[in-house]
Image: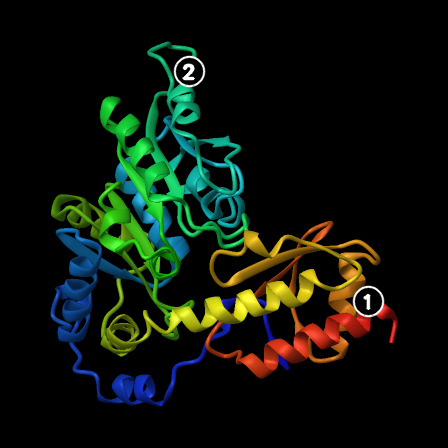
């Protein structure tokens, strides 16, 4: 099977498996796992923050950040198609007791003037705004890179109103590699950031939250409350260290494969799509000659896995598990399906 459902399907390579086996271990809840400590120090340095913390998943990382930044009865501004709003099972409302304020962005980017307009005034009828959330790259917008200028503009608004900004940077290294902007420049615009080790970076599990040291100290308590306090977590951290040290530059291969796929699909009759919309490793197309369910089903029968994300949109995501030959075969297979062969 050619698995283009997500970059979450990546498997640890031989070097990661060996690192997991040989990892130096301790009890991380006591702060005694040397591999976790090394990963957290490395991660904090890479994103330019004082401290970092390993969590089992990106969703937990985002929710710990929301819990740490906010209090119940407040409101959090976020993009209407953001992962925190769309894919985290209303966790922010369930656990943090906050009210989301979803705003429609442009290709995933929130205009600073819209964010400022949405910040609540001091009125007993309204919930006070407590946090602004951004996402870069933006998944449902097609893996788009949120421009640094846009993030800086939102940051200026946040400073004006004394509000924290959290970045769901699950694929922030994709954004950096694609744009040429150092990760630290993106993360300088936010109070906290979450990024995944287990997507394009190829580790089997784990995400990182980073921010100020007081923020991470508070976040550790929330991680514990949510059941995320792990013990000999060095077996996870060892793979994460290799992911950060050896897999970041490799993301360019995924982007090149996504570009090849985008150009190939855009040339097919029965597909509505502008390949210039592809920034990183996600390609989202609209079939015009058949339903998305039928397209997905027919592709699966022929050995290509995709994800239907809207009634009229199908997503293809490249990763290290997919090579150029797989992309060429996928384009040919889509062509055959659309032609009814």
Is 264 above or below relative to 273? below
Residue 40 picture location, percent across and down = 18, 63
Q: Which residue appears at 42% of the width and 15% of the height?
A: 126
For marks 1 and 2, the one nearer the N-term is: 2
Q: Which residue appears at 31% of the width and 60% of the height?
A: 228
Left/right placement of residue 215 relative to residue 307 reads left
Nearest the viewer among 145 and 19 is: 145
Is 14 above or below relative to 250? below
Scheme of image coloration:
rainbow
Residue 94 picture location, percent across and down = 45, 40
Few, some or many residues within 10 Å of mark 1 (<14, 14–19, 20+): some
Name the residue that disc number 1 marks: 338
Q: Which element type, helix, strand or loop, lies under badge 1?
A: helix
Numbered label attached to residue 122: none
Left/right placement of residue 140 relative to residue 112 reads right
Is 28 above or below relative to 167? below
Give the Cα distance between marks 1 and 2: 51 Å
Left/right placement of residue 87 relative to residue 224 reads right
Callout in the foreground (1, 2): 1
Q: Which residue appears at 21% of the width and 83% of the height?
A: 23
Nearest the viewer among 115 and 21 is: 115
Quadrant of the rendered image containing residue 337:
bottom right
Left/right placement of residue 202 relative to residue 289 reads left
Q: Tell me whether the residue at label 1 lies in contact with that at label 2, contact meaning CB atoms closer than 8 angstroms.
A: no
Residue at the far right: name it: 340
Quadrant of the rendered image containing residue 237:
bottom left
Residue 271 picture location, percent across and down = 74, 58
Name the residue that disc number 2 marks: 126
Quadrant of the rendered image containing residue 91:
top left
């Amino acid at each position: 099977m050619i698995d283009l459902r997500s970059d979450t399907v990546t498997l640890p390579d031989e070097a990661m498996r060996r690192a997991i086996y040989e990892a130096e271990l301790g009890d991380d809840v006591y702060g005694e796992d040397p591999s976790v400590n090394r990963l957290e120090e490395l991660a904090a340095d890479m994103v330019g923050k004082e401290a970092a913390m390993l969590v089992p998943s990106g969703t937990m990382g985002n929710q710990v950040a929301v819990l740490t930044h906010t209090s119940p009865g407040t409101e959090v501004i976020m993009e209407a198609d953001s992962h925190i709003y769309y894919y985290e099972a209303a966790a922010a409302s369930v656990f943090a007791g906050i009210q989301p304020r979803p705003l429609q962005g442009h290709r995933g980017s929130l205009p600073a003037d819209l964010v400022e307009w949405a910040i609540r005034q001091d009125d007993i009828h309204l919930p006070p705004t407590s946090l602004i959330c951004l996402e870069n790259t933006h998944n449902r917008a097609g893996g788009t890179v949120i421009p640094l200028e846009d993030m800086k503009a939102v940051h200026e608004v946040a400073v004006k109103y004394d509000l924290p900004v959290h970045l769901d940077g699950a694929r922030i290294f994709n954004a950096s590699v694609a744009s040429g902007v150092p990760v630290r420049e993106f993360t300088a615009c936010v109070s906290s950031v979450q990024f995944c080790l287990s997507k394009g970076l190829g580790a089997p599990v784990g995400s990182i939250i980073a921010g100020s040291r007081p923020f991470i100290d508070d976040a550790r308590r929330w991680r514990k409350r949510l059941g995320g306090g792990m013990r000999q977590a060095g077996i996870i951290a060892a793979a994460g260290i290799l992911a950060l040290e050896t897999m970041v530059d490799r993301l360019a291969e995924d982007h090149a494969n996504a570009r090849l796929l985008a150009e190939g699909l855009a040339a097919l009759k029965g597909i509505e799509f502008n390949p210039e919309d592809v920034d990183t490793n996600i390609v989202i197309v609209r079939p015009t000659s058949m339903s998305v369910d039928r397209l997905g089903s027919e592709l699966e029968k022929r050995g290509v896995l995709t994800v239907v994300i809207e009634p009229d949109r199908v997503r293809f995501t490249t990763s290290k598990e997919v090579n150029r030959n797989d992309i060429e075969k996928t384009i040919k297979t889509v062509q055959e399906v659309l032609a009814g062969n």
